[in-house]
Amino acid sequence: MRLRPLGKTGLLVSPLGLGAAEIGFAGMAQPAATELLHFAIDHGINVIDTAAVYETSEERIGNALGPRRRQCVLASKCGWAAEGKSSPASWTEENIRRSIDRSLVRLRTDHIDVMLLHSCDRPVLERGEALAALRKAQEAGKVRFIGYSGDGETAEFACRLTEVSVIETSINICDQANIETVLPAAREADVGVLAKRSLANGAWRRLEEFPPAYREFYREYIRPYADRFQAMGIKLAEWGATEMRWAEVALRFVLAQPGVHVALAGSASLEHLFDNLQAARRGPLPKEMVDRLRQVFSQAESRSGEKWGALR
């Protein structure tokens, strides 16, 4: 894959990035995680996205990379408590400093390329303490670029902060709100964009198709995507797209959005990762299909009688 600049950072990134939440949440053993990470790097993926709260993800990455760390753009997230809950205390300078230092140890690196505040609300950004903690880490050489991970109005606001060079935000066929709000603000500020949940949490899959570890989260985390997908009522065969699977359509839809630099996709298997690589190499989805997906989303939203905002 051809690398391109990540906004104003100047970092060169692959259009497909590996979302490493599944490495932690799926409880991958170290040998399997190492094989997956090396396979990704061998095939041109250089962006690895993780977070302090993704259970064992950072440790598995740190143990796997070794000298290949130099080939990667590592992004992680800070601010949430260790148990995965957000509170006012999560965003103090001291807790963010501790989170960054812990991530450095886990990732076995002396710096993290992009450190993102993990979905704090706008008042946290406006108070400035969290950003100040990241600036100090940046000045100390622990962090190269500062970012924000989140959605909606807060992400749009973050794009306009001078400290913020990267935004990670939800963009997918079932969650298109940020295309209208966050992406224009990011383009205007030349902020790098990492698109999370590119595969829409596999909204087209039946419950029994998900790994057992994910089925308990289906109702809260995946079902809203599945409900929107059903409401959109898309039949690929009717569009003449019988040669494509939904995962490919979803990924290439994200890659077609102006301003998206990296589409993040998680994977816990080499087969799925290979499929994502093949899809990304085919490039953005044709404009007519992108326009159709935007149209059916808008129509389904109108039929629902409510605004379809960003999903978790």
Image: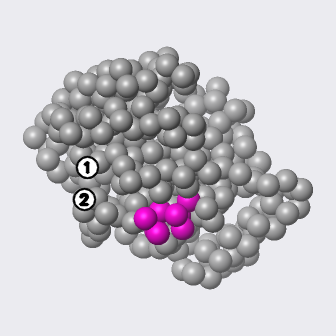
Residue found 29% across the figure and 68% down from its top: 4
Query: 105 or 56: nearer the eye?
Result: 105
Q: Position of residue 85 (x, y in %)?
A: 55, 22
Query: 276 or 308: nearer the eye?
Result: 308
**Residue at which label 1 appears:** 73
User: Along the polypeptide, which appears first: circle 1 or circle 2?
Assistant: 2
Q: Can residue 182 be seen in this snapshot? A: yes
Tell me the crowding category of disc 1: few under 14, some 14 to 19, or many 20 or more residues within 10 angstroms, Cα based.
Answer: some
Task: Give the amino acid at mark 2.
Answer: Leu
Give the position of the N terminus as an image quadrant: bottom left
Q: Main secondary structure of the magenta part?
A: helix
Q: Secondary structure at mark 1?
A: strand
Residue found 24% across the figure and 46% down from its top: 144
* In this rendering, position of residue 205 left or right of residue 155: right
**Residue at which label 2 appears:** 11
On whether residue 139 falls in the magenta region, the answer is no
